[in-house]
Image (spheres, grey):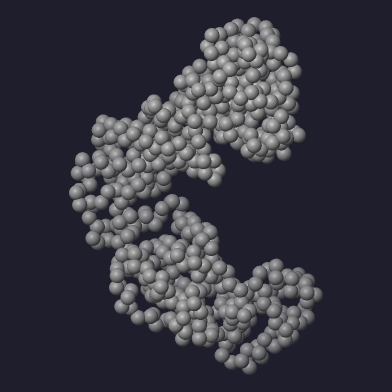
Amino acid sequence: MASAKQQYTAENIQVLEGLEPVRKRPGMYIGSTDERGLHHLVYEIVDNAIDEAMAGHCNLVIVTLHDDGSVSVDDNGRGIPVDIHPKAKKSALEIVLTTLHAGGKFGGDESGYKVSGGLHGVGSSVVNALSVKMHAEVYRDGKVWMQDYERGRPVADVKAKGETKKQGTLIRFWPDKEIFDTLDFSLVVIMNRLRQQAYLTRGITIGLLDEREKRSEEDQKYPRLYRFHFEGGISAYVQHLNDSKDVIGKPIWFEKEVPEGFVEVALQYTRSFQELVASFANNIHTTEGGHHMTGFKAAITRTINAYARTQSILKEKDENLTADDVREGLTAIISVRLKDPQFEGQTKSKLGNAEMKTAVETVVNEKLAEYFEEHPGEARDIVAKCTLAARARLAARAARDSVIRKGALDGMTLPGKLADCSSRDPSECELFIVEGDSAGGSAKQGRNREFQAILPLRGKILNVEQSRLDKMLVNNEIKSLVIALGVGIGEVKDFSKLRYHRVVIMTDADVDGAHIRTLLLTLFFRYFPELMEAGFIYIAQPPLYKINKGKEVMYAYSDEEKDKILKEWGVKPEELEIKDEDETAPVPEENEALTKGAKAKKDEPKKTARVNIQRYKGLGEMNPEQLWDTTMNPESRSLLRVTMEDAEQADATFTTLMGSEVAPRKKFIQTHAKTVKNLDI
Ligand code: TSJ
């Protein structure tokens, strides 16, 4: 075939290299030799068939997981050319499968951007090198051609083995157990990948057949045969992602060839708050985004604002909708194809080609504006959804401002409940935020007044207000905290005024305590991240158990520690019954003698000898001295410094605690937006 010869000229096959380096350092070519690397082999071969489909020559790809551990992929494309390359004096098929970086598909012809991006840009020869065996069959010009390989080396020349009416290519390979940690393919993993590829390649049919007798437990949950075909392509993908959501109109879809390559976008707004925007470059999911994503975001922001202005939905005095406003509730897929994709970032999944920003931006600007012109009803719905998001954002700000407004906190005196310390040197001052008045009492009595301040917060109030972070700032408890810190909040924060360089959250070791801790961490994370970054936020570590043998007292801060102490004291945990404090007589805190007496009395009736364990359910159960010894005394206590990661975790927990919605806080504000004054959109 003339065209095949053209494709496989010497210039096109740029680097002719042996495959030894691939077997020596497989990780360099497929990323790793674990399960991920193993699956990469399948993707690499499938990508070739999908390229043929994208070139318009094939519409069916079938992947089979065989019972002998091999995988085969066949397509109904033109068939890899088999003619002899004049310089290499080898069949093109052999060159493709045995030469690193070779093959017409990597050449620079005008359809060159239709290449697969392959995470590591490798190719079928790498798969061959990492397989004990490979078998290739090409159906072309009425003949069947074949060649076999062992660890990348051809066993014999390409030869014809009969006639056929079929057209296409079949590749079967047996991954090498010397290379891979595991040879077990996961049907689920492959299925997900193929489904995604089918969405991204409109009109293609991808079949998947699992012929293995022994399947993993996970795989057994799924049938053995699949067929992925999406006439709608990424538009169907968007529809699928929005399956369970309340949508605004049909998915909007457009595509365009541009000098830089090819841009395809599908998007659909939903009435949810979730943003789901995924981008792909040459069918590779760019999880870290990149220039195509940036271009897309810029374009929707611009287009929606422009439309809202021309339609006078946004008035002259109104602020523009922000990029966040226009992405709330948006589901979109951006798919670009380009000649030389550059993958950057931590996981090499960020598109680095700057030219794709303008390419995507221009296409989306033009096509989306056009769509809005042609569908004014839908356009209005979308703009309304975005202005609603803006209103929620402004309401949140207004709610905050109502507490923050300069001077609002300034004039206020320190809260009455705060038992402040006498030192005015913030670097030595500590603020203990304590849950509940009773624990607050113990802490106030037990502390060192010189440098330790106590602020009791009433747990109940915090619990009730849990789902209303913005309201929280209007809550008196929190207001007290903000005033006690001395820094203000929002735009008028001033950290030079911070009154304590240690802020210690001291809550009970129970569910409520954990809840309040989460809430406080969330508050710090969202409103005082600076304190967190500076390492000023701590969590107190009160003991979980008091263990005593006669007069000897030990505190255990974890179950492991408790067991360790018991072991040291020669007690088997089973022999002990653990008492909750409230099952025993309350211990009067003030009277030292009485306290001792009570302890002694408790010791006596224990049939299991002298060792006694008491589980603390709350800080309030400790007397001031105990609280000082175990939790507050800088000499003997341990504090947990809160990191940004802890806080992020808390923030996430907080969000899930409040329900399944992704932005419940916004939802709350939204439903209450009408009640917030000074809002005028
Ligand atoms: F590369 C491979 F072995 F991994 C592989 C390639 C595996 C599979 C399953 C399919 C393919 C493949 C390659 N399918 N279709 C093609 N097509 C070509 O290589 C081809 C055919 C004809 C012409 C032409 O110009 O006539 C050009 C090409 C690149």
Above or below for 136 versus 295 = above
As rendered, which of 266 and 95 lies closer to the eye?
A: 95
> In percent of the image, x 44 and y 32: which residue is there?
336
Which percent across, then down, holds residue 214?
72, 33
> In percent of the image, x 41 and y 35: which residue is there?
355
Which percent across, then down, holds residue 668?
36, 57
Image-quadrant location for residue 622? bottom right
* Left or right, residue 260 beside residue 174: left
Above or below for 371 versus 471 = above
* Left or right, residue 617 beside residue 255: right
Image quarter of the N terminus? top right
> Is residue 154 at least partly visible in the picture?
yes
Count the marks.
Answer: 0
Q: Residue furthest right?
A: 570
As rendered, which of 636 and 8 lies closer to the eye?
A: 8
> In percent of the image, x 74 and y 74: which residue is there?
565
Which percent across, then down, holds residue 518?
50, 64
Above or below for 223 versus 424 = above
Which percent across, then down, holds residue 101?
60, 26
> Is residue 579 at least partly visible in the picture?
no
> In percent of the image, x 34 and y 45: which residue is there?
326
Image-quadrant location for residue 478? bottom left
* Left or right, residue 51 beside residue 661: right
